[in-house]
Image (cartoon, rainbow, N blue to C red):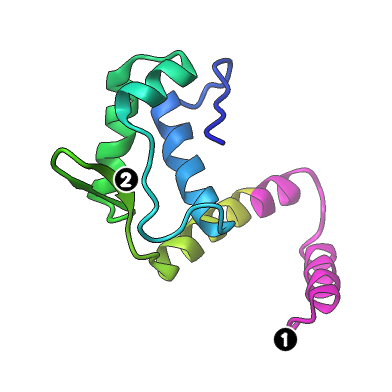
Amino acid sequence: MFDIDINSRTPIYEQLYRKVIELIIKGVLGEGDKLPSVRALALDLHVNANTIQKAYTLLERDGIIYSLAGRGSFIAKPDHLLAQEYILGDFDKAVTAALQSGITSGALCERIDTIAANQGGDSQ
């Protein structure tokens, strides 16, 4: 569930931070779900416990998780604005890469309209 890429240029703590948010958005993790302990996750991922602690600290700072002394870390009530910002941040990166590769804004808009129509969403 908490897979990381040790060959990635993205720091492991950041990968874990993003993975937790992704799992919340996808509904795999929900409010009140308990996360693995820092030590257990560090052993499972074969990384230093300080790396896991750094990710958990950032997640708690941003209100994504909360900790209870002696009981562990849990998923907080989802913040839909945070989820939207996370998704739109990835969208912005994808659009920037597409524009830089020569895809026109018109082609991107058409693609969005097609996806929205297939999802039953409003394309306007």
Please name the amino acid that badge 2 sits on.
Leu
Q: In the rendered structure, which disc, 2 or 1, sits on the residue that comes first in sequence? A: 2
Would you identify the image quadrant in which residue 42 lies? Answer: top left
Residue position for label 1: 124
Q: Can you identify the residue that label 2 sits on? A: 59
Percent of width and height locating residue 49: 31, 19
Q: Position of residue 43 (x, y in %)?
A: 41, 16
Q: Which SS type dominates the magenta stretch?
A: helix
In the rendered structure, the answer to whether residue 56 lies left or right of residue 87 reads left
Residue at 32% across, 45% down: 59
Q: Does residue 41 belong to the magenta stretch?
A: no
Q: Residue at x 46, y 13 (%)?
A: 46
In this rendering, the answer to whether 15 lies above or below 94 is above
| Side of 121 relative to 12 (left or right) | right
In the foreground, 111 or 68: 68
Residue at the image point whose x is 28% and y is 43% from the top:
73
| Amino acid type, residue under disc 1 in the picture | Gln
* Label 2 with label 1: CB-CB less than 8 Å: no
